[in-house]
């Protein structure tokens, strides 16, 4: 039976079919839906959201040592958090198979950077698989588990936004778990990484690397698709799909396992074609290695390394290959002059909108449209906090989550974003450096549990005086409403202890802790003013459930009475998508379809012009 | 580029939260029911929070890329008036553009950083030779819920897609909750009949 599955659904299906019994992760676009789909098989697979990626990997590491097959999921920046565990798990190795799905985000659709996780495979000396569509996404989970068990190694499974969030047809199979008893067999020299044993593990890794090298050449996970011999393209992941369409005449070496590198296959492939082109997304990892083998190839000189590859970029690459025909093959590896074909991340001569389509061209791009970036939802509880912060001349160190949208106009109340938890710690750093203004750190509930607590401990421990705001919307909102230690519910759907942020803050040693309703604008204004004045650490927890999750109106929909509105524009400073303005001095209009009835605009209007709408719908 | 003629490409655009994912799923499932290989791509995460979004669907005998090369979409559907202008480069010359008349004012306009084009309709007519401008909200309301404006647009798009009526019906049944099927089918039919 074939089913239309996203890459993330296919990873989940693959884990189910391959007999995974333990899965852990932390939400992060584009990886989140894997566990959300896997938990549909909760009678067979234990699934959990861990407080952060490092914990998730450690949970799975423990489980895999009992012989259980395990899956871990995270986004690329999450692997940075989990890297400490990964680096030594590579030494300790696996018993039951352990596959770590890491989702890169080339082009930064929903991320703060676009790091290339392939580096971690080499860094940790662990194999990496890279599916190129949903069918492979499913198959590679099982393959990864088998490799993990055969070579006693954690396996990285790298996906990307376009793999995870593209759908394709997938052949479904049965669940066929390997027969095995869950039991941890004690063996300290194997599982205890103290120096004297770690040194032995270090030697064993090199032996394993050699065996994996052999495997990658012969297993069939990498394949050569011979076609024309003038051009051979080395590629991987979603780029493979674009290559197949843009270069139907070329031979292709498709890397399903991108580490260790298949040296013999690189040599065989290069020997069979006149010219080698490496089409890889983000960093030039294959290209560097191929050149280190003494093989001449084109790559970064033609293929952009910033942002994601797309069919349009492949069309540009094709045009450049055709123009450069005969230039590169004679160039020795590694010394291709940058000027040979022009370097840089985009083609010269503007956008290639119509270059490939001789004759009629599509309509030109319209460039003067108003931008439409993502915004805080109508009725979002974060809005009141930013509005209140806007009354003070403070520095706001922000964090990762929906509330990062508070940086945009007209709220404009966030000054930094670095990584999970940094909203708390950076506030402390700025204050200790002597920043003259008050510094406020802002962090969400899930992010607080992920890595805000340690920053808060630091503030108390080292006698800081920052004000930390926790915008607690009772869920992990940005990634689509996942539970976290504060929500009182597990991924398995069981009720559990709801950890109190206020209690955690007090336990850290913060004396000034208070909880405020962010929809109450006067209370929000007062709380922020008072805590900013305090000369000691303080925490304000603004609690209100995410408006998207409730799906109910927060109150009556509002309307703006045109005869009472003075067009002062104050309500527009909330940046609510439901309040539509069209210029200075023009009275704003309420979009009744969008209003969620939070009433913040009613609270700030000085003329009483915002009324309760009587009729709904 | 050769080898592309047998793949049909479709794009759906609009504002995050308008139901683009569901619309995309219906098109993809209809193609699947008709026996084609199908790939889609959708936007999740941050962009869904009221931002400009695009979903892409491709079907044919064998589909490689889930992304639509610009200038190759046979049909473009837009759930919002000016979002259709943002993605003009995707439609192939002569392709069908179905545009909902709905206007959602971006916060960039409300906060005075930009203006919402008053001449959107004229600009659409200039950009798209084959334009179907539909009152999707109104038709959806008549079908029973304004939320089904996405199905009205899909219905209008279906006129230019060579997929059988049963495939569309099966796709809608598979994609929406049972109690909403009738309303969504009605909205689809209103869209298909709209001129």
Image: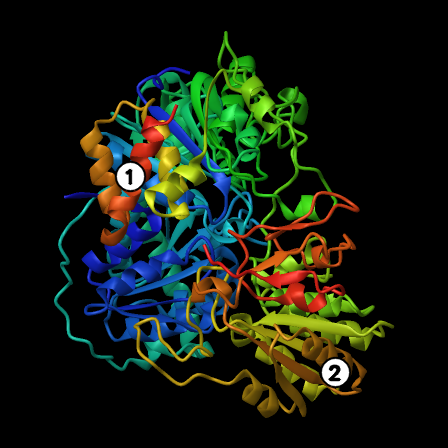
Mark 1 burial class by Cα count in 10 Å: few <14, some 14-19, many 20+: many
Decide: is A382 above or below B95.
Answer: below
Residue ID at (42%, 16%): B1
Residue positioned most to the front? A563
The correct choice, above or below, for A47 with respect to A143 in the image is below
Please indicate whether residue A503 sits to the left or right of residue A198 in the image.
right
Q: Nearer the viewer, mark 2 or mark 1?
A: 1
Q: Position of residue B117 (x, y in %)?
A: 65, 32
Which image quadrant: the C terminus of chain A? bottom left
Is A110 on the left-hand or right-hand side of A253? right
Return the residue found at the far top: A359
Any mark on residue B186, and which?
A: 1
The mark total stands at 2
- Which quarter shows the N terminus of chain A? top left
Is label 1 in a helix, a strand or a loop?
helix
Where does the image place residue A329, in percent across and percent down from the top left? Answer: 51, 19
Residue A296 appears in view: no
Chain ID, mark 2: A
**SS for tag 2?**
helix
Could you tell whether A251 is left or right of A465 in the image?
A: left
Could you classify mark 2 by the number of other residues whose Cα lies within 10 Å: few (under 14), some (14-19), or many (20 or more)? many
**Disc 2 marks which residue?**
A531
Q: Chain of mark 1?
A: B
Horizontal and vertical percent for residue A459?
69, 82
Q: Name the residue rendered at 65%, 81% in the picture.
A: A540
- The CA span between labels 2 and 1 is 56 Å
Q: Residue at x 80, y 77 (%)?
A: A432
């Amino acid at each position: 039976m074939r089913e239309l599955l996203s890459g993330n659904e296919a990873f989940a299906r693959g884990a189910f079919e391959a007999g995974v019994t333990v899965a852990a992760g932390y939400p992060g676009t584009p990886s989140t839906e894997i566990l959300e789909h896997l938990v549909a098989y909760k009678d067979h697979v234990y699934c959990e959201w861990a407080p952060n990626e490092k914990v998730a990997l450690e949970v799975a590491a423990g489980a895999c040592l009992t012989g259980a097959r395990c899956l871990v999921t995270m986004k690329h920046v999450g692997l940075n958090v989990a890297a400490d565990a990964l680096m030594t798990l590579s030494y300790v190795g696996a018993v039951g198979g352990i596959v770590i799905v890491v989702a890169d985000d080339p082009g930064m659709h929903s991320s703060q950077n676009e790091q290339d996780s392939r580096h971690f495979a080499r860094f940790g000396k662990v194999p990496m698989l890279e599916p190129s569509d949903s069918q492979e996404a499913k198959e590679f989970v099982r393959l990864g588990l088998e490799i993990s068990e055969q070579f006693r190694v954690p396996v990285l499974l790298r996906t990307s936004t376009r793999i995870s969030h593209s759908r394709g047809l997938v052949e479904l199979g049965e669940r066929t778990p390997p027969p095995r008893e869950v039991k941890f067999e004690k063996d300290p020299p194997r599982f205890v990484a103290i120096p004297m044993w770690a040194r032995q593990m270090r030697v064993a890794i090199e032996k394993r690397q050699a065996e994996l090298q052999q495997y990658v050449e012969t297993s069939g996970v990498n394949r050569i698709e011979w076609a024309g011999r003038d051009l051979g393209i080395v590629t991987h992941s979603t780029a493979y799909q674009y290559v197949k369409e843009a270069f139907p005449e070329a031979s292709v070496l498709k890397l399903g396992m991108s580490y260790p590198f298949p040296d013999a296959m690189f040599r065989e492939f290069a020997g069979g074609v006149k010219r080698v082109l490496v089409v890889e997304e983000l960093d030039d990892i294959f290209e560097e290695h191929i050149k280190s083998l003494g093989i001449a190839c084109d790559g970064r000189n033609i293929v952009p390394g910033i942002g994601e590859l797309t069919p349009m970029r492949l069309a540009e690459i094709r045009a450049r290959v055709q123009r450069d025909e005969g230039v590169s093959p004679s160039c020795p590896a590694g010394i291709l002059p940058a000027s040979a074909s022009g370097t840089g991340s985009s083609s010269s001569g503007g956008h290639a909108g119509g270059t490939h389509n001789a004759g009629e061209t599509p309509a030109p791009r319209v460039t003067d449209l108003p931008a439409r970036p993502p915004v805080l939802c109508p009725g979002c509880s974060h809005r009141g906090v930013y509005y209140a912060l806007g009354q003070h001349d403070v520095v706001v160190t922000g964090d990762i989550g929906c509330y990062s949208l508070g940086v945009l106009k007209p709220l404009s109340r966030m000054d930094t974003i670095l990584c999970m938890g940094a909203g708390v710690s950076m506030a402390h750093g700025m204050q200790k450096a002597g920043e003259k203004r008050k510094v406020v750190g802002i962090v969400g509930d899930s992010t607080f549990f992920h890595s805000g607590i340690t920053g808060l401990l630091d503030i108390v421990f080292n006698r800081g005086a920052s004000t930390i705001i926790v915008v607690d919307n009772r869920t992990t909102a940005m990634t689509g409403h996942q539970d976290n230690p504060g929500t009182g519910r597990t991924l398995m759907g069981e009720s559990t202890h709801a950890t109190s942020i206020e209690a955690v803050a007090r336990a850290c040693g913060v004396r000034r802790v208070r909880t405020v309703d962010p929809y109450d604008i006067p209370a929000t204004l007062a709380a922020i003013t008072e805590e900013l004045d305090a000369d000691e650490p303080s925490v304000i927890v603004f609690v209100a459930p995410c408006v998207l999750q409730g799906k109910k109106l927060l109150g009556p929909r509002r309307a703006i009475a045109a005869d009472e509105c003075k067009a002062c524009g104050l309500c527009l400073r909330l940046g609510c998508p439901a309040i539509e303005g069209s210029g200075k001095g023009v009275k704003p209009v309420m979009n009744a379809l969008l209003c969620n009835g939070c009433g913040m605009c009613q609270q700030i209007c000085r003329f009483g012009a915002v009324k309760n709408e009587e009729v709904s719908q | 580029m050769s080898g592309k003629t047998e793949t049909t490409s479709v794009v759906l655009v609009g504002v995050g939260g308008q139901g683009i994912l569901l619309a995309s799923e219906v098109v993809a499932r209809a193609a699947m029911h008709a026996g084609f290989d199908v790939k889609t791509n959708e936007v999740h995460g941050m962009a869904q929070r009221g931002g400009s979004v695009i979903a892409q669907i491709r079907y044919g005998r064998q589909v490689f890329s889930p992304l639509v090369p610009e200038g190759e979409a046979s049909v473009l559907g837009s759930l919002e008036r000016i979002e259709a202008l943002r993605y003009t480069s995707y439609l192939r010359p002569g392709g069908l553009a179905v545009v909902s008349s709905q206007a959602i004012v971006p916060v960039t306009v409300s906060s005075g950083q930009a203006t919402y084009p008053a001449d959107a309709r004229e600009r659409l007519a200039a950009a798209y030779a084959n334009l179907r401008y539909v009152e999707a909200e109104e038709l959806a309301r008549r079908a029973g819920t304004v939320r089904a404006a996405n199905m009205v647009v899909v219905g209008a798009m279906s006129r230019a897609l060579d997929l059988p009526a049963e495939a569309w019906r099966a796709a809608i049944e598979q994609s929406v909750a049972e109690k909403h099927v009738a309303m969504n089918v009605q909205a689809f039919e209103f869209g298909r009949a709209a001129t």
